[in-house]
Amino acid sequence: MSAIVAIMPTAEYNAVMEGRHVKAARAMLGMSQTDLCKLAGVSRATLNDLENDTGDPRRSSALAVESALREKGVNFIDDGDYIGVTMPKNRA
């Protein structure tokens, strides 16, 4: 029996995305915070706030980080019971 999984294909200010998902995605990609900051065009302080669920990062910053991760092949999933981060096995 397989579960139906909703994969959010584009950045849409994913309310499901939490700091731990950003950290997990970054780890899966082998990216440093500096790498992700450069790719997303956000400051290190902003990324720290997003990853630690602290502060009050702008919606545009969260979207920029989400978009940058999606460009690298990351998907944020929500099947109603579970949320998570996935990426293809054979990413280019």
Image: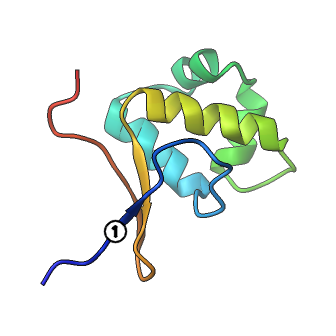
Q: Residue at x 67, y 31 (%)?
A: 64
* Residue 55 falls left or right of residue 23: right
73 or 36, nearer to the observer: 73
Residue at 45% in and 46% down: 9
On the image, the x and y values in percent for residue 3 come to 25, 78
Note whether 81 is above or below 83 in the view shown: below
Three-letter amino acid code at disc 1? Val
Residue identifier under label 1: 5
User: How has the structure been colored for display?
Assistant: rainbow
**Vertically, is 29 above or below 79?**
above
Q: In this view, does 73 lie to the left or right of 40?
A: left
Tell me where residue 57 appears, x and y as whole percent: 83, 44
Label 1 environment density (alpha carbons within 10 Å; few <14, some 14–19, many ≥20): few
Percent of width and height locating residue 27:
38, 39
Secondary element under disc 1, as helix, strand or loop, is loop
> Measured from the top left, where is residue 87 in percent x and y?
29, 43
The quarter in which the C terminus is drawn is: top left
> Residue 40 sits in which quadrant?
top right
Q: Depth check: 75 or 52 in front?
A: 75
| Residue nearest the viewer, comparing 70 with 31 | 70
In the image, taking residue 29 as reference, residue 83 lies left or right, namely right
Would you identify the image quadrant in which residue 63 lies? top right
Q: Along the horizontal axis of the image, is 9 left or right of 14?
A: left
Residue shown at 12% from the left, 84% from the top:
1
The structure residue drawn at horizontal position 48% and vertical position 25%, both measured from the top left corner, is: 32
Number of marks in picture? 1
